[in-house]
Image (cartoon, grey):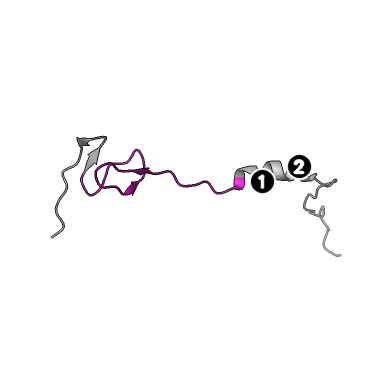
Amino acid sequence: MGRSQGPKLVMPNPKRRHSKARTRTRRAHDALKTPQFYIDKDSGEAKVPHRIDAKTGTYRGRQILEVKDAE
């Protein structure tokens, strides 16, 4: 006797073609976003907002961390 053949597994495929508008609407969220930054008033360099400055240890003008000098 031969092996019993179980139900054949088939991957699902779309029945109808998606319109261009539907495809583009879905892809509207895939665009790369520009990185957010601000220009520091003291040093003049671009920095990421809402982060403690690693060099000085300050955040919003207040000293938060004690920074060790790299010597």
| Mark 2 surroundings: few (<14), some (14-19) or many (≥20) residues within 10 A | few
Q: Residue at x 43, y 43 (%)?
A: 36
Residues marked 1 and 2 touching at CB (< 8 Å): no
Question: x, y (%) of residue 50?
Answer: 34, 38
Residue 44 is inside the magenta segment: yes
Q: Label 1 amino acid?
A: Arg
Q: Quickly name the residue at label 2.
A: 21
Query: In the visual, does 34 lie left or right of 50?
Result: right
User: If the image is split into quadrants, where does the C terminus sit?
Assistant: bottom left
Q: What secondary structure is found at the residue carrying circle 1?
A: helix
Amino acid at pointer 2:
Ala
Q: Position of residue 70 (x, y in %)?
A: 16, 57
Identify the mark at residue 27; answer none if there is no mark.
Answer: 1
What element does badge 2 sit on? helix
- Write down the region rendered in magenta: 30-56
Q: Relative to the observer, which residue lies in front, 5 or 48?
A: 48
Which residue is rendered at x = 83% and y = 58% of the image?
Answer: 5
Query: Percent x, y for residue 42?
Result: 24, 43
Based on the picture, tell me whether residue 26 belongs to the magenta stretch.
no
N-terminal-most mark, 1 or 2: 2
Residue 48 position (above or below residue 4)? above
